[in-house]
Image (cartoon, coloured by chain):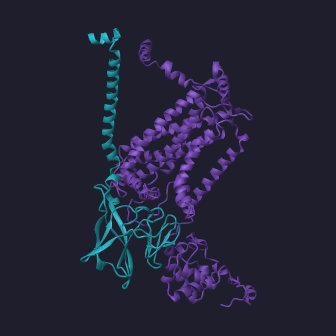
Amino acid sequence: MLRGIQNVLMWFEHRLVLRETFWPIVRHPVPRSLRRKVGWMYVLGSTAMTLLFLQVATGIALSMVYVPSAGEAYESLNYLNFQVPLGWMLRAIHNWSATMMLVIVVLHMAQVFLSGAYKYPRELTWMLGVILFFCTVGMAFTGQVLRWDADSYWGLGVGAAMIGRIPYIGPALVDLMMGGPMLGGETLSRFFALHVYIIPGILFATLGAHLYLVVRKGISEPPEQGKEVNPDTYEEEYEKLIADGAGDPFFPGPMARDAFFIGFTLLFVLALAVFLGPDGPGLAPDPANVAAEPVPDWYFLSLFAVLALSPRSLETYIILIGPVLIVAVMLMLPLWAGRGERHPYRRPVAILSVIFISLGTGVLTWLGYTEPWSPHMNAWTGNAVPVNIVKRLSPTEMQGAVVLQLKACRNCHALDGIGGHRGPDLTNVGSRLDRPTLVRQVVQGGGNMPAYGKQLTGAQITALVDFLHACRPENRPPAVVPTPGSANATKKMGGNDSS
Amino acid sequence: MGRSMNDTEKPTTDNCCKTDRRGWFDWISWLVLGFASILLSLPIIGYLFGSVIWKKKDQWVPLGKVSAFKPGTTEMVTIKNPVRGPWDGITGELALYVRHLPEGEAKEFQVFSLHCTHLGCPVSWFDEPGLFLCPCHGSVFYSDGGYAAGPAPRGLYEMKYKIEGENLLALVGHLPTLQDPGSANVMASQT
């Protein structure tokens, strides 16, 4: 019996010759120093790859139900969520595994960057890795489009508006992206093709080359302080680390560590999927529903913040040149810094860059999440004037409070911290601006505020300014702007409230 | 058969001409393949870039009876997009803001796209303050579509309109962007 099985296996082996081709690959030697704790730094790449395989598996499963048609996609997702047994679970795994994959890919990049593993002779491995990173981001964006809810719909609109700013060819690229003059069925089909055929094709081809180089050029040895990469001698020295039994075969030793970490990550993804469930779909992709307040998925929140905060005059340049610069710097990094010290302790600029980039992205993501620049569309009817302010108002000032609410000022201005945060909080505005300044600001606008002159009657302006004037802590004098040369400027500063 | 043996066996005096002929055939072969590839790629490229090369044009679409819009008001109108596809579903709809100007103004109507000129998010109309507010990055526009505040680079996109009999029509279809704005192509008041 056993002999029979052996014969069958040998029959295949005789034809496939795996012992000569595949076996040496899984047994490729890695430096023995990976046995130390630092070896745990090497598990991220294979984890990202495993998550990619999980994405393919769950993605194929989802495609058996999902309908990539603008009229039916949204419904088919709700059908998956609520009708198909375990459909919600598959959507959740696909979503959280994608999230985790992005996180792991970024960590992998940071680790390779910090340990200088991108230096000679592994420059091309890094460059292919950069392509893999952007493919992953591309998969995330196109995947979010397939969710085909209001966020996806308007997210595409934002994409179109950005592309439309490219000089000369912008409008043509917009039509190419949308598959027509407007967002619709052909847009969704296009992004389905991108998400399912085109980007995965590029991704797997690049991954193949990336892996080929990893095995061919060998895994980088853990960096040592003071040991510089010199292209003339590096390969000879590396050979000493792995040749003639000096290294460990990747399988089974070091690979077991990968297996543990991958297993742990998969359990984590499963837990996220079970406890947090699938993401959306949110509101239907209704072009007429202005109540939709589109927000991108978390990984684009920082970009969302950049677009809100960049100066108007520079914005187009930031949108168009920024990405090109980022891609160029990432791709060219190993050509520029491809030799020398590898250990992070000897590369302060590398450490500072990682700290700076993560802090910057973190802060921008937080800003994108809180979006203080966005008006609160329902504040004018939803947020009342706080009682502690109302109770000390005169009748005219109360009329002013009504004007403030009715004219939707609260959408951008908070009282006691409640309301929009686009403009300054008005709780104490009376102690910052005097009456003439308040009138001018209301009537003429300015400083990123619209002019309300045409929308308000004289009585309304008086009432509103009275109210704003009264918006200050009790016992705090109203603001007075000293005019140069005015005799009573100093006296007024003393705090006599003339109102 | 015999001839090919001759070819390999004896280097004849007309060797030069034979290699010339073979070289010429090689050239022809590659040329045929190249020509076929280019010819074949034309329809494929044309298909892929069809939405750019044969772009669907905007069309006049009725928005409703003129009498339905009260002077001095702005309201949203939802119509079927004339350039929609057969399975566009709800995304085949198109929403516009129609402003009926107060009597005595130079023109009677203004038709705006919902898309903010900053990055295309849908602006909301607020009747009392007479403003359009964008939920994404907080751009603000006046009731005439002019820029009021925020990161937008210009006023709202405006569409051409005409009145035929009792009906108000607008020239609509494509998604307006900065270099391909609404059909009225009016740069509304800028700062």
**In the rendered image, the vertical position of residue A335 relative to residue A301, given as above or below:** above
**In the rendered image, the vertical position of residue A1 relative to residue B114, given as above or below:** above
The picture places residue A476, in percent across and down from the top left corner, at 70, 82
The purple-tinted chain is A
**In the rendered image, the vertical position of residue B166 relative to residue A249, given as above or below:** below
Residue at left offset 53%, top offset 38%: A128
Q: How many labels were placed on the picture? A: 0
- Judging depth in this view, the residue of A195 and A251 nearest the camera is A195
**In the rendered image, the vertical position of residue A405 relative to residue A285, given as above or below:** below
Residue B7 appears anywhere in the view: yes
The quarter of the picture where the N terminus of chain A appears is top left
Residue A4 lies in quadrant: top left
Residue ranking furthest to the top: B9
Tell me the shade of chain B: cyan
The picture places residue A74, in percent across and down from the top left corner, at 37, 54
Residue ranking furthest to the front: B13
Residue at left offset 56%, top offset 23%: A27
Residue A383 appears anywhere in the view: no
Instruction: Report the side of B185 relative to A244 (left or right).
Output: left
The quarter of the picture where the C terminus of chain A appears is bottom right
The picture places residue B57, in percent across and down from the top left corner, at 31, 60
The picture places residue B62, in percent across and down from the top left corner, at 28, 70
Residue at left offset 33%, top offset 25%: B24
Residue A338 lies in quadrant: top right
Instruction: Report the side of A15 relative to A320 (left or right).
Output: left
- Judging depth in this view, the residue of B127 and A382 nearest the camera is B127
